[in-house]
Image: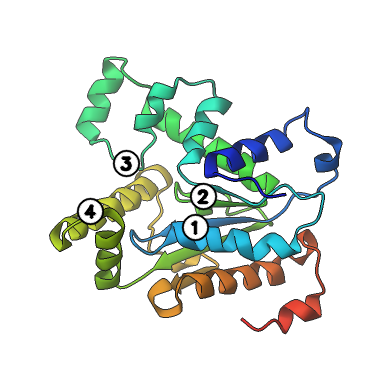
């Protein structure tokens, strides 16, 4: 079954695993979870979509659609923990300055950031345990590191390539794109370091690191997909010999 729209897919995914969900979904075994850490401009959004398409042939009638959780993850966190929608502005990877964050907490303008990170982490862990999802960012690879159904990927690309991609995607000048990339990458690096004491560039945090400039988006997704099929065959419906000889 295909559901249009990222938010609609996320809602359907969640509802399918609720206690009141249709019995056919209760028969489905938990699937694999893929976490994606990325450099800005490495194409995580496109690779994630390509991954969803890659796994469609390996799903059956009892499978809920593979779902991407990136920006819609915020909605899931707010819903899970009964938080007001106005808090969505604070669920950004380390975008608030330390001073502003501290002042706002003292004034009661928003909860302590550690509480928000904890709630986000709990939601990510629950989604990862269910599986059949791609979780982008927010230290998903660290949070789900001990789950046997998880597979962790880091997407990278040369800076010049990423600048060009950001220029085209957001209609920015070269200098604006370069500054945007610098801020985004620093925010993600600080988020992982501050809240999880990990270095985002540490290759040992990932099962695979892929240069999307070298392989392209579709090929990168195929490489990841085949690796997941090989490492987590119990979650899929396929002839293993067919997968191993599949022409990628």
Q: Earlier in the sequence, mark 4 or mark 3?
A: 3
| Residue at 38% across, 57% down | 199
Look at mark 4 in the image and give the residue it sits on: 180
Task: Give the label on residue 94, or none.
Answer: 3
Q: Earlier in the sequence, mark 2 or mark 1?
A: 1
Q: Which of marks 3 and 2 is nearer the N terminus?
A: 3
Q: Which of marks 1 and 3 is nearer the N terminus?
A: 1
Q: Position of residue 156 (x, y in %)?
A: 38, 68
Image depth: mark 2 or mark 1 in front = 1
- Separation of disc 1 and disc 3 at Cα? 18 Å
Q: Nearer the viewer, residue 172 or 137?
A: 172
Q: Are marks 2 and 1 in contact (CB under 8 Å)?
A: yes
Q: Is residue 222 above or below residue 104?
A: below
Neighbor class of circle 1 (other Cα within 10 Å; few <14, some 14-19, many 20+) is: many
Task: Give the label on residue 140, or none.
Answer: 2
Residue at the extreme top of the image, as rendered: 107
Q: Is residue 214 visible?
A: yes
- Separation of disc 4 and disc 3 at Cα? 14 Å
Q: Position of residue 122 (x, y in %)?
A: 56, 36
Q: Position of residue 108 (x, y in %)?
A: 32, 15
- Separation of disc 1 and disc 4 at Cα? 20 Å
Image depth: mark 4 or mark 2 in front = 4
SS category of the residue bearing label 3: loop
Quadrant containing the C terminus in the rendered view: bottom right
Image depth: mark 1 or mark 4 in front = 4
SS category of the residue bearing label 1: strand
- Separation of disc 3 and disc 2 at Cα? 15 Å
Q: Nearer the viewer, residue 217 or 132?
A: 217
């Amino acid at each position: 079954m295909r559901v249009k729209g990222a938010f609609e897919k996320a809602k359907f995914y969640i509802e399918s695993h609720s206690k009141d969900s249709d019995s056919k979904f209760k028969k489905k075994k938990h699937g694999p979870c893929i976490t994606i850490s990325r450099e800005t401009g490495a194409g995580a959004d496109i690779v994630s979509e390509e991954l969803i398409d890659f796994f469609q042939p390996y799903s059956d009638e009892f499978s809920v659609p593979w779902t991407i959780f990136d920006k819609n993850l915020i909605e899931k966190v707010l819903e899970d923990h009964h938080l007001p929608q106005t808090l969505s502005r604070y669920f950004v990877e380390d975008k608030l300055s330390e001073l502003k964050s501290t002042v706002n907490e003292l004034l009661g303008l928003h909860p302590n950031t550690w509480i928000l990170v904890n709630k986000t982490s709990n939601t990510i862990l629950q989604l990862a345990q269910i599986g059949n999802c791609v979780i982008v960012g927010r230290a998903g690879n660290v949070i789900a590191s001990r789950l046997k159904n998880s597979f962790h990927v880091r997407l990278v690309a040369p800076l010049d390539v990423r600048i060009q991609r950001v220029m085209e995607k957001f209609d920015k000048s070269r200098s604006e794109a370069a500054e945007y990339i610098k801020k985004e990458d620093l925010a993600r690096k600080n988020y992982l370091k501050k809240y999880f004491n990990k270095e985002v560039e540490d290759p040992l945090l990932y099962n695979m690191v892929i240069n999307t400039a070298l392989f392209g988006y579709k090929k990168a997704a195929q490489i990841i997909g085949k690796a997941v099929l090989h490492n987590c065959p119990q979650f899929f419906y396929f002839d293993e010999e067919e997968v191993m000889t599949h022409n990628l």
